[in-house]
Image (cartoon, helix red, strand yellow):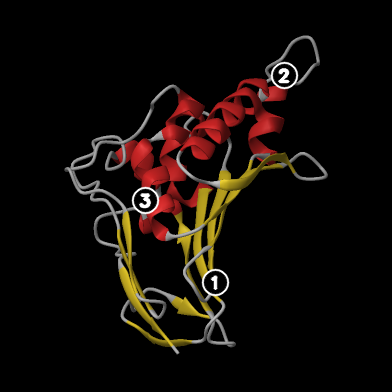
Amino acid sequence: MKTFFFSVFALLLISAGCSISQEYHFNSDMSGNSTAMVDVSQMKEFMSGMDSTGNDNSMDTMDQSFAKVAETYRQLGAKNIEYGWNDDSTVLFISYDFDNVDVVNKVMASGADSELMGGATPKTDGKKAEFKAKGEKKLSYTAPDFAKDTTMNSEEMASMKDYYQYKLSFTFEREIKKLDNKNAVMAPDGKSFEFSGSMFDILSPEYKTDFKVKLK
């Protein structure tokens, strides 16, 4: 969920702009796949320009960190873990399969992806991100509360919000019967929905990504 953004937050502060997406797919039995992607094309261009040697080695540490994150995910029950760059090396991704939402909750609670920035994560007020599944047709999500985080709520960061885009999406094998979040945009096929826009708007305390969904 939102936790992937927090891991790379400090790095984004020095970039020229960035786009992050988090995708979850749920099969009929609530197993599925999670994929997080960071478009760092502008970041790489910016950091490469600072290298007097002309070599772009700026993202090497992120490559190494993803290997550590993948190993932690594996220990927590994640399967078929993949990570790396897309074909033109502008999008960094990590994905894994899960047997149930308990695996996803363990991954989120572990803070493993904070390794990407040495533990740089905004402060919560004790509220953790969590999925809850009831049978095979009901799923809910509770988002963490970052109202007290001074970095997220600073005027300086708010002035740069248009440079950072975020998309959080969910797809289901079953068709959606009922969804209780008005911020979510439903796809025409009735099997997916998403939250997208300025990262700082979506991650703000005023914008809710908590939801309860009932499937057919």
Q: Is 92 located above or below residue 145 in the figure?
A: above
Q: Amino acid at mark 2?
A: Asn
Q: Give the crowd class for mark 3: few <14, some 14-19, many >=20 residues within 10 Å.
A: some
Q: Is residue 1 at all visible to an observer of this figure?
A: no
Q: Nearer the viewer, mark 2 or mark 1?
A: 1
- Residue 7, image x, y percentages: 45, 35
| Real-space Cα separation, disc 2 to disc 1, in angstroms | 39 Å
Q: Residue at x 49, y 33 (%)?
A: 72
Task: Point out which mark residue 27 bears.
Answer: 1
- Left or right: residue 201 compared with residue 8: left
In the picture of the structure, the residue carrying the numbered disc 3 is 105
- Residue 160, image x, y percentages: 44, 43
Q: Is 50 located above or below residue 135 in the figure?
A: above
Q: Amino acid at mark 1?
A: Asn
- Residue 162, image x, y percentages: 48, 51
In the picture of the structure, the residue carrying the numbered disc 2 is 57
- Left or right: residue 9 compared with residue 134: right
| Real-space Cα separation, disc 3 to disc 1, in angstroms | 17 Å
Of labels 3 and 2, earlier in sequence is 2
